[in-house]
Image (cartoon, rainbow, N blue to C red):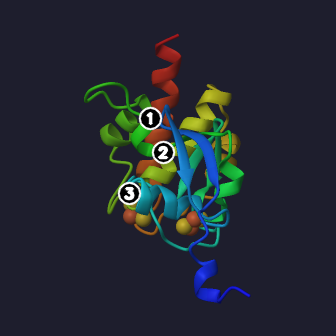
């Protein structure tokens, strides 16, 4: 019979996925959380760690275009998926994504810890619905908490991004 210590040397399963447009084969335990894979294995630390129980939205990423909490997503759930983090939103070179620009212009941040998650959620919303109502915005950001801005700058940034989108069509 094998000793328990020997069992730990079994190779990890492989999960094929795409992270920020780069196809990857991840060799990780099936139950490893996407948040840990991004931050520890891929060094994409723009995705933040806070509550780790799906309450704050600091770890929000896009999976196949939908906003998802990376702290609640296991490696096996990423197989065949397209994952986009805050680092993957910007264009080539130094170009910021329009939602990133809007947060910068309107001061939609203070300490900045919630900001990547906020921007990911707003990006997903505007991609699906370029003309959201206030209620749509509140709903889309209901899973993103900010402890320091009072939300005023965030609301202005979202409005700025909406208007910018209208102007560019
Ligand atoms: S760290 Fe994932 S929701 Fe808070
Ligand atoms: S800017 Fe500090 S938590 Fe939101």
The mark that comes first in sequence, 1 or 3, is 3
Is residue 114 at least partly visible in the picture?
no
Disc 1 secondary structure class: loop
Would you place residue 131 above or below residue 74 in this image? above
What residue appears at the point 54 percent right and 63 percent down from the top-left corner?
145
Ligand 2 within 8 Å of disc 1? The answer is no
User: Percent position (x, y) of residue 1?
Assistant: 74, 88
Secondary structure beneath dot 2 equals: loop
Q: Which mark is residue 89?
A: 1
151 or 34: nearer the viewer: 34
- The picture places residue 8, in percent across and down from the top left corner, at 59, 78
- Pick whichever, 40 or 98, lies toward us: 40
Q: Give the label on residue 45, or none.
A: 3
Q: Residue at x 40, y 31 (%)?
A: 97
* Picture residue at 55% right of the left edge, 50% below the top: 26
Q: Is residue 94 left or right of residue 49?
A: left
Q: Is mark 3 within 8 Å of ligand 1?
A: no
Residue at the spot of label 2: 85
Q: Nearer the viewer, residue 135 or 168?
A: 168
> Pointers 1 and 2 in contact (CB under 8 A)?
yes
Tell me where residue 86 appears, x and y as whole percent. 44, 44
Which residue, as the protein is rendered here, is positioned at the far left? Answer: 94
| Label 2 environment density (alpha carbons within 10 Å; few <14, some 14–19, many ≥20) | many
Residue 25 picture quarter: top right
SS category of the residue bearing label 3: loop
Q: Which residue is farthest top?
A: 169
Mark 1–mark 3 Cα distance, whole angstroms, equals 14 Å
Q: Residues within 10 Å of mark 3 (few under 14, many from 20)?
A: some
Image depth: mark 1 or mark 3 in front: 3
Residue 129 location, quadrant:
top right
The CA span between labels 1 and 2 is 7 Å
């Amino acid at each position: 019979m094998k000793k328990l210590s020997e069992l730990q040397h079994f190779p990890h399963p492989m999960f094929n996925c795409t992270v920020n447009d780069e196809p990857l084969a991840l060799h990780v335990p099936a139950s490893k959380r996407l948040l840990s894979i991004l931050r520890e294995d891929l060094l994409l630390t723009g995705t933040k760690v806070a509550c780790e129980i799906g309450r704050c939205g600091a770890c929000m990423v896009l999976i196949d275009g939908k906003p998802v909490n990376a702290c609640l997503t296991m490696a096996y759930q990423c197989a065949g998926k397209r994952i986009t983090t805050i680092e993957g939103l910007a264009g080539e070179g130094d170009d910021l994504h329009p939602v990133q620009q809007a947060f910068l212009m309107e001061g939609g941040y203070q300490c900045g810890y919630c900001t990547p998650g906020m921007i990911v959620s707003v990006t997903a919303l505007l991609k699906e619905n370029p003309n959201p109502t206030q209620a749509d915005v509140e709903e889309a950001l209901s899973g993103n908490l900010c402890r320091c801005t009072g939300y005023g700058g965030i609301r202005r940034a979202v409005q700025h991004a909406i208007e910018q989108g209208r102007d560019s069509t």
